[in-house]
Amino acid sequence: MMKYATLILFFVLFSCGQKEDILLPKSNITVVSDVKDHSPTYIFFRTNGKDTLAEVNRKNSIISTNWIFNIDKRLPLRLVIPEVMKLQEKKRKEVAHKNEAAENYYAYADTIGKNMAFLPFTKVYYKMKQPKFGLIVFFDKNNQISVNEVVVKREDVQKYLDHLPSDKPNKFIFCFAKDLSYGNYIQDKIFIRSLKFPMPDLNLTNEEFVY
């Protein structure tokens, strides 16, 4: 299997004699530095007139391996997440070649470590709608953060969450604007991982909402 070793600001796929570019998201943090026994899935940025399209290529994805999703950072979540959901569902329903240990990862470039990096999302269940309960942490298309409709500076989010009044554990629901770019989404996901929660089993869900 191919092993990612060097920083690339774009991913180049040679397919049918043509060069295809994917502009990968960037961050200054490596979540996972190496994934063994993997196969790729690509989601390309395409245009048709004024319309933006997401084109999926998973010809080399093997069900029993770890899947690495190489997705163009320019695509909006409204196009990316439905395709990711379809692929997740296909892998979850597989019986004949299922590998319970196989994970799904988003690929991105670490600009500080000068390497490819990976963000696991196997256990995430996406919903293309608004949640009906919970304390809403929302990332809008301008990459502002609001907590229950109160805008909070990114550097103040941890302090704000720590001081929320509650007579029982808050259930935090992470939500994202459907027009948020996939590149910003990955940065937001990495930011969320930096937050501290007193009781993760009670405070967090495996669901993410896009609307």
Image (tube, grey):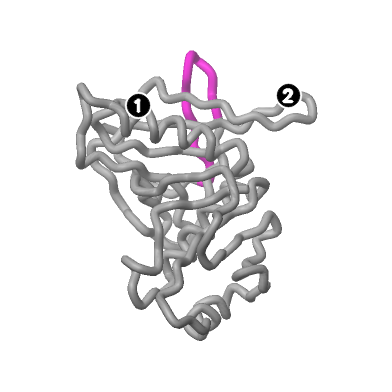
Q: Position of residue 118 (x, y in %)?
A: 38, 50
Q: Residues within 10 Å of mark 2 (few under 14, many from 20)?
A: few
The three-letter amino acid code for the residue at tag 2 is Asn
Which residue corresponds to mark 1? 61
Secondary structure of the residue carrying numbered label 2: strand
The dominant secondary structure in magenta is strand
Based on the displayed image, in which of its 4 quarters is residue 136 positioned?
A: bottom right
Q: Position of residue 81 (x, y in %)?
A: 53, 40
Residue lying at the far top in this picture: please name it.
16
Seen at 70% across and 58% down, the residue is: 142
**Vertical comparison of 179 with 165: above or below:** above
Q: Is residue 131 visible?
A: yes
1 or 2: tag closer to the N-terminus:
2
Q: Nearer the viewer, residue 30 or 132?
A: 132
Q: Position of residue 110 (x, y in %)?
A: 45, 56
Seen at 62% across and 40% down, the residue is: 78
152 left or right, relative to 27:
right
**Vertical comparison of 24 with 142: above or below:** above
Q: CA distance from mark 1 to mark 2?
A: 27 Å
Residue lying at the far right in this picture: please name it.
50
84 left or right, relative to 62:
right
Q: Nearer the viewer, residue 81 or 136?
A: 136
The three-letter amino acid code for the residue at tag 1 is Ser
Q: Which mark is residue 48?
A: 2
Q: Nearer the viewer, residue 97 or 74?
A: 97
Please report the bounds of the magenta region as a residue range. Answer: 9-20
Seen at 61% across and 33% down, the residue is: 45
Q: Nearer the viewer, residue 82 or 136?
A: 136
Q: Quadrant of the N terminus?
A: top left
**Vertical comparison of 30 with 1: above or below:** below
Q: Is residue 141 magenta?
A: no
